[in-house]
Image (cartoon, rainbow, N blue to C red):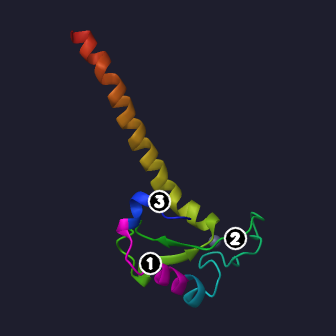
């Protein structure tokens, strides 16, 4: 999955090389978790596999080999889903707080 522009500065300068080494040399162009082959139909979803590199601790500044895994989009999405759901809940909480403040001020005003 492409790196979001606001996240790019967190990645090491040689990220492309690290990503390629993990995907093509270490993982042999396959998902390291489900063995799906890059650019072939996924055995479960049938969609074309695009091998990506996941940070297992979700920290892009920690790009050592043991923190990286070459994953198909299915495995990567499943691994990141709980973190993304937490992010959505936190953003929703901030929105709710923001919208409640004017009403509370109004009640006391
Ligand atoms: Zn996979």
Say whether mark 2 is within 8 Å of ligand 1: yes
Mark 2 or mark 1, earlier in chain: 1
Measuring from the top left, give residue 8's x and y in whole percent: 41, 65
Tag shown at residue 84: none
Give the residues drawn in magenta, as a range.
9-22
Tag shown at residue 49: 2
What secondary structure characterizes most of the magenta part? Answer: helix
Front: mark 2 or 1 = 1
Q: Quadrant of residue 43?
A: bottom right
Residue of label 1: 15
Q: Crowding at label 1, few (<14), some or many (≥20) Cα neighbours within 10 Å? A: few
- Position of 51 relative to 105 (above/below): below
**Element class at badge 2:** loop
- Position of 38 relative to 74 (above/below): below
The one nearer the camera, 45 or 1, is 1
Q: The N terminus is located in which quarter?
A: bottom right
Measuring 54% from the left and 83% from the top, which residue is drawn there? 20
Q: CA distance from mark 2 to mark 1?
A: 21 Å
Measuring 52% from the left and 84% from the top, which residue is drawn there? 22
Q: Crowding at label 2, few (<14), some or many (≥20) Cα neighbours within 10 Å? A: many
Q: The C terminus is located in which quarter?
A: top left
The one nearer the camera, 50 or 93, is 50
In the drawing, does residue 24 fall left or right of residue 55? Answer: right
């Amino acid at each position: 999955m492409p790196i979001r522009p606001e996240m790019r500065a967190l990645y090491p300068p040689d990220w492309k090389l690290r990503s390629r080494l993990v995907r093509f040399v270490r993982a042999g162009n396959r998902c390291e978790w489900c063995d799906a082959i890059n650019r072939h139909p996924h055995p479960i979803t049938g969609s074309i596999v695009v091998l990506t590199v996941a940070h297992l601790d979700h920290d892009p500044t920690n790009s050592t080999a043991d923190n990286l895994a070459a994953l198909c989009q299915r495995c990567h999405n499943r691994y990141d889903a709980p973190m993304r759901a937490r992010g959505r809940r936190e953003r929703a909480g901030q929105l709710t707080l923001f919208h409640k403040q004017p009403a509370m001020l109004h009640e006391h005003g």
